[in-house]
Amino acid sequence: MSGWKERVRKVTPYVPGEQPSGRDVIKLNTNENPYPPAPGVARALREIGGDDLRRYPAPDIAPLTGRIAERYGLDADRVFVGVGSDDVLSMCFLTFFRGPEPLLFPEITYSFYSTWAEVYGIPYERIPLNDRLEIDPADYCGRSCSGIIFANPNAPTGLSLGLSAVEKIAASNPDRVVIVDEAYVDFGGDSAVCLLDKYENLLVVQTFSKSRSLAGMRIGYALGSRALIRCLNDVKFSVNSYTMNRAAIGAGCAALEDEAYFEECLSKIVSTRERAKEALASLGFSFPDSRTNFILASHRSVPASKLYERLKEEEIYVRYFNTPGIDNCLRITVGTDAEMDALFAALRRMITEEEAQKR
Ligand SMILES: *Cc1c(COP(=O)(O)O)cnc(C)c1O
């Protein structure tokens, strides 16, 4: 082996969902929003001129930071913006969790948490969910740890934890940073933003990728105390001062200006989700009661891996995780009503065939 190979940082990377390019693909595998971003976003992008690109963007990501702050009734120095919440979360891991005690997070959750812990050399401990796939707040209280992170609603279970449970975790860990990843909160979770004035150690992370249809633009943010945001900025300015490009800043501001459109898309997705729960149940699936834009479903007789492969042959993409505890589940993103109907028709046919073969 060449000597340099021994000096390289080795990691097992996070594996994102497939991004197939065909036009007829039904893509229900990465929790993207099926509806386009607010119309003002395209307008804002058209208005970007040569001078905007010639010059560096604002290092404090103004005016987007201010607009986000306004929406949540916070001062701008309590908002940190990054290149998708993945960038924000990665900065959080680098800033807040130094060990030697373990960082705590659920055993079944966003699989990027263990990847960041590995790449930054942060010791961690994964805490099992209860048998209903819920986070038990008691597991995160009174523990020796370097910090806590969990997604609420959790992914890929889709289950939401009540605010009193989130508050209990923040209150029992005043000497540790507690991060709530609220990537899906707009689809029906309870946001911890209202607890931020009470807990200096609490940080809420959200994204424009799911509820605001801007996964391709890469905008995420953290909301918290001035002290936490200052620490995040110190690390960010030690890595890359200009994280957000001007197109993303403009697009983000435009998306925030159209709350009516935002609410309309959310209510369509929520009603399609509730309809999907009925359709999936009638096909023989069971699933936790999702508060997100996806459903983690397992079938009573046909293995998830088989359905995943067969759907893919028909260019219907859902997500399958070969992970203990959820390896018989499909994570199905809520698409448009038409996309979901195509999925249900395909599933009905496949399940009928598979069950007939078993007889
Ligand atoms: C999608 C997702 C993110 C990352 O989203 P970005 O596109 O990077 O903003 C973070 N956390 C969870 C739980 C997610 O599902």
Image: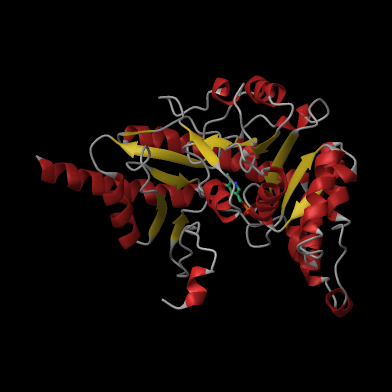
Q: Is residue 344 above or below residue 240?
A: above
Residue at 78% from the left image edge and 54% from the top image edge: 235
Is 298 left or right of 134, judged from the image as shown? left
Q: How is the image coloured?
A: secondary structure
In the rendered picture of this protein, how many numbered marks are placed on residues? 0
Q: Is residue 307 above or below residue 126?
A: below
Q: Is residue 332 above or below residue 150?
A: below
Q: Is residue 12 above or below residue 110?
A: below
Q: Is residue 96 visible?
A: yes
Q: Nearer the viewer, residue 108 or 187?
A: 108
Q: Quadrant of the C terminus?
A: top left
Q: Nearer the viewer, residue 327 or 44?
A: 327
Query: x and y percent of residue 232 in the render?
Result: 78, 49
Query: x and y percent of residue 137 in the render?
Result: 58, 23
Is 246 left or right of 283, judged from the image as shown? right
Residue at 83% from the left image edge and 72% from the top image edge: 48
Q: Quadrant of the N terminus?
A: bottom left
Residue at 69% from the left image edge and 23% from the top image edge: 167
Q: Nearer the viewer, residue 350 or 162?
A: 162
Query: x and y percent of residue 341 in the render?
Result: 41, 47
Single out the residue that lies furthest toward the front: 3
Q: Quadrant of residue 55?
A: bottom right
Residue at 52% from the left image edge and 37% from the top image edge: 125
Q: Quadrant of residue 351?
A: top left
Q: Nearer the viewer, residue 323 or 215?
A: 323
Is 228 left or right of 336, judged from the image as shown? right
Q: Is residue 208 visible?
A: no
Query: x and y percent of residue 289 in the render?
Result: 48, 29
